[in-house]
Image: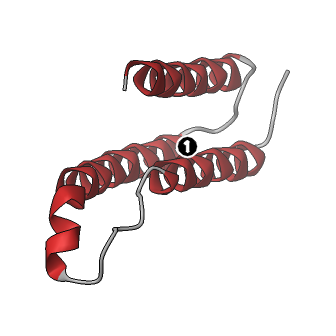
Amino acid sequence: MNMGKNRLEAFSDGVIAIIITIMVLEMKVPHGDGLGALAPLAPVFVSYVLSFVYVGIYWNNHHHMLHTCSRVTGGHPLGKRASAFLVVAVSIRHRLDG
């Protein structure tokens, strides 16, 4: 099964946008109106920034890889589904442990 590069690129952009959206949903609103109310949220914010950088690097490398391809076969989308499943499974595991 052959698929156009543009279609896969648009799909991966959508998946990465959803991942970033899910990550930001983990951030909570501070309870209070001073700067001291932000201190307990600092670890969550730092982990979000680091995760955002990691996802950005992944996205950039993915686009670079797609620009070097001439065609896309069925194996690549299957790998994308597997990696997306792993992200969801780790997220669910994290929520159950936390």
17, 9: nearer the viewer: 17
Residue count near mark 1 (Cα–Cα under 10 Å), binned few <14, some 14–19, many ≥20: some
At horizontal 56% and vertical 26% (from top left) the residue drawn is 88
- Residue 62 in percent (x, y) is at 48, 42
Q: Is residue 4 above or below residue 98?
A: below
At horizontal 19% and vertical 57% (from top left) the residue drawn is 40
- Residue 60 in percent (x, y) is at 41, 52
At horizontal 37% and vertical 26% (from top left) the residue drawn is 98
Q: Is residue 44 above or below residue 79?
A: below
Q: In this view, does 6 lie above or below 1?
A: below
Residue 17 falls in image quadrant: bottom right
At horizontal 69% and vertical 34% (from top left) the residue drawn is 71
- Residue 65 in percent (x, y) is at 47, 40
33, 86: nearer the viewer: 33
Q: Where does the N terminus fall, quadrant-wise?
A: top right
Residue beneath disc 1: 66
